[in-house]
Image (cartoon, helix red, strand yellow):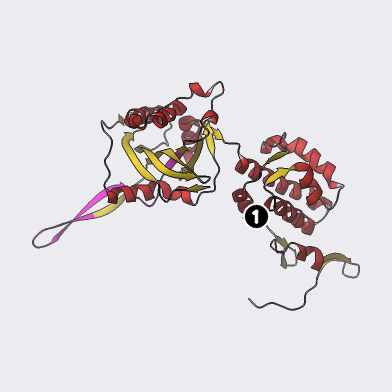
Amino acid sequence: MINLYNTRIEDLAIHRVGNKNKGEMLLTSSSSTPLDDEMHSLLKEYFLKPFRSKEEAYYSFHHEEDLEFHEMFAFAKAIFSTPATLLENSKKIAKQLYQQSVHPHIRSGEVYVCHFTNVMLDNNKTDAIGIFKSEIKQDFLQFEETESDLKMILKQGVNLNKLDKGAIIFNVEQENGFKILSVDSNRYDAKYWLDDFLGVDVFEDENFFTKKYLKFCQDFAKDVVLPAEDKKEEVMFMNRAVNHFAKNDSFEESAFLNDTFENPDLIPEFKHYKTEKGPKYSIEDVSSFPISNTAVSAARKGIKSVINLDTHVQIKMDFTNSDSAEKFIEKGWDEERQMYYYLVYFNREEKK
């Protein structure tokens, strides 16, 4: 969990990075950019706003051989060790981005490298490095006033309401490549930002494993529970799975299986499905991990709890009161109509 409310920009360097393949230039500044209170407030909001509403899926610097050979890791490590070297290392970061800016779709733009303090991450105070890029320019009107009229001038500039690309490198987990958050509004060149420039991989923490395991359960419910049982059981299986995660601080697979499967015959199917599909979700060898409440809440929102019938009727089941579907909905077969039916029990119709 991150809290950026009291975060401050302690130092900022701005450079311009062109598209190397198009012959555009790299321009690095000779000094840091001073900020008054108004500019600090505007830039802080511009840089950090996209990260406040972002689901926390962290990355970390990754190198096939050793992190010490990872250039971006080395630059970040140097800034954290000696914040006064931000300008020097920001030039190296800008040059690294320029070297990767070769695809014809990549736009030139301003690159901002800053050092943040008072960053709260998982209730601990730390510092961070921000790397941001503005690419798309928008037209705006500026007016000059004379004694008799107004002169209208058309200019282009950066829209401070929309950040094009950004990454925050938190000064934690250095031995594992730091924890990093990234945003990218222009998805057509995502590989260039995440892979070629930053050189990151997914950070395998409790958020990662909680999210991946619940996604695995959701696909198992669709691929195995639904064909073996019915749509109601598919929904109820996921209901029990999410509730198990919600009421526990740590995950143990044996306890999960006992708590979630009402039909024990499906447990061998689950284990076989995990052996077969587990590598796709990076959970093939995972049977225990701390649970992330943030990931559980996000997963609950993404799970459909509606049964859609071919008679244009929907039955919506309530995950908050999980026993309701078990107690008050029955499925049957009508011989006369040759149709399935759901029988729903209730005391009164509630007006909302």
Identify the element where label 1 is drawn. helix
Q: Position of residue 144 (x, y in %)?
A: 16, 56
Q: Where the C terminus falls, by quadrant?
A: bottom right
Give the farthest residue toward the left. Answer: 147
Q: Is residue 297 above or below residue 321?
A: above
**151 in magenta:** yes
Q: Which residue is mark 1?
A: 300
Give the farthest residue toward the front. Answer: 124
258 to the left or right of 135:
right
**Residue type, label 1:** Arg
Q: Is residue 20 above or below residue 344?
A: above
The magenta span reads: 142-168
The image quarter containing residue 274 is top right
Nearer to us in this view, 188 or 247: 247
Q: Residue at x 38, y 52 (%)?
A: 161
211 to the left or right of 186:
right
Q: Position of residue 27 (x, y in %)?
A: 29, 31
Nearer to us in this view, 269 or 31: 31
| Prevailing SS of the magenta stretch | strand
53 to the left or right of 270:
left
Q: Position of residue 135 (x, y in %)?
A: 37, 42
Nearer to us in this view, 181 or 124: 124
**Quick check: can you spot residue 172?**
yes
| Local crowd size for mark 1, using a 10 Å CA cut-off: few (<14), some (14–19), many (≥20) | some
The image quarter containing residue 12 is top left
